Image: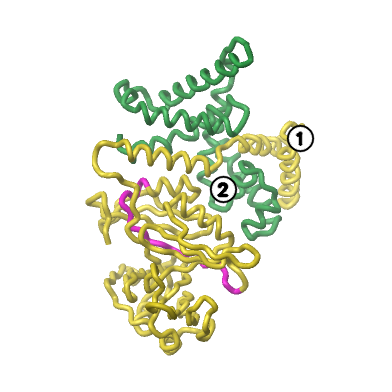
Chain colours: A green, B yellow
Amino acid sequence: MNPRLFAKLYEQNFDRVYAFVARRVGHRGEAEDLTAEVFHHALANLGRFEWRGTPFAAWLLQIARNALADRWQRAARERGELSSETGEPGIHAEADRRAMLAQLVGRLPADQQRVIRERFVEQKSIREIARDLSRTEGAVKQLQFRALESLRAHLRDLHE
Amino acid sequence: MSDEARIERLAQALEAILADPGAPRPSADPELTELLRIAHDLRGLPRPAFKAQLGADLLRRATMTTTTGKATGETIESVTAYLAVRPAVELIEFVKQAFGAQELRRTSGSGGGVHAEVRIGDSTVMIGGGGAWGGTPTPTGLHLYVPDADLTYGRALGAGAESLYAPVDQPYGDREAGVRDLAGNHWYIATHRSGGHVPMGLGTVTPFLHPRGAPRLIDFLKQAFAAEEVETHRGPEGAIAHAKIRLGSSIIEMGEAHGEWRPMPTMFYLYVDDVDAWYRRALAAGAVSMESPALQPYGERRAAVRDAFDNQWYLAEPASSGSGTR
């Protein structure tokens, strides 16, 4: 496959796959490992995907489901238990919401994006972020507030 | 409730949920509760560095395994500083008078604005703006190597520049002076003392940045543009005093902002072999899109991104082929 096309597919599907996996595993490290596994598997097996012609996102999520099932079975075997994938209700909606949120963050102004990522994803303190951005703590709190307000407004728009 | 009070109340509530995600969330105010729920979900978003790294790994693998055509998304052909300023026409005259620049091309827009490319020694600098142009000017810092720094400094002052500092022998072996031109660009005019007047590996003109947080900018350049750290010198307190970073075959210099050397976000024009691939890679590294890849009327495919330091990176390739050369 043309690398440029694969890059585009990665960009379009990364948030959905990550959110799907992250919702089902406890740790960030595990979510990252599984997401990487899904995309590497997809890249290695692109020929099969292209033959079948299923939507790419659905195919990626099927790879993710299989990878999760493998992992659970392995963990259960290690603990000497029977494994089963729990079909927790609402889990899809929750993953969709997070994937959407990731996309919306990408549309915020640059300074708000940075505050959101440093504050919530990297969990830095207001003081650290203020130092990084050479802004006052008050200014960072204001950016944090504006960014969350803006995300709420966008999420509402989507649901209406 | 005033905005200030709401901002502060939100900040305190967030502090509590970040310190202890299991802590009960206030429910008296539905608006606040909604913001806290969003904040809670944001904690589960992926790390941008992870997304960028995985994207780069996959792209490398996809490029290696592809069986058709040559590898793309691999080459940066050139990196050129773009000085977008209001007195663009006057700046072109200034660089001709002060530095003996040659005008390679100039095009004028209907509003009287210009785009020009000038050659100074072996380097190209782009200058644009003027007329009705209403963008944000991006004067920048430029390291200029000349045979006689004292002489060029004198010419620059004669052509209307202001002195930043008179010629001085620097501890690192250069004779160096600084001027600010009429558009606000800083020119660090230097003569290298050993070998030729230009140090090995540098061109006549090299963009010089003073970011706040130089290591983070270097990391970004590595992730976004496959940059390499050629050399880095740190000051006594560990801050980067001087670094040379290679992008493709070009070098960018930088030193941590300090004292009067404050950040001057810069515009760069990069010719690359695959605009879309480099654009995507820059976004994955945390840059923000300014322009999605699109065909320009003058025959280039172009995209633009802004990094967290407000530098602007224009990525371009000739529209007719997959490999840009300039």
Residue underneath mark 1: B26
* Relative to B306, B19 lies left or right: right
Given this view, does label 2 or label 1 mark the residue nearer the observer?
Answer: 2
Mark 2 lies on a secondary structure that is: helix
When asked about the image quadrant of residue B109, the answer is: bottom left
Q: Residues within 10 Å of mark 1 (few under 14, many from 20)?
A: few
Per the rendered image, the range of residues in magenta is B260-277
In the image, is residue B266 part of the stretch drawn in magenta?
yes
Coordinates of residue B39 in the picture (x, y in percent): 65, 39
* Relative to B238, residue A72 above or below: above
Residue underneath mark 2: A113
Q: Residue at x 44, y 33 (%)?
A: A13
Spatial CA distance of label 2 from label 1 is 25 Å
Amino acid on which disc 1 is placed: Pro
When asked about the image quadrant of residue B195, the answer is: bottom left
Coordinates of residue B236 in the picture (x, y in percent): 64, 67
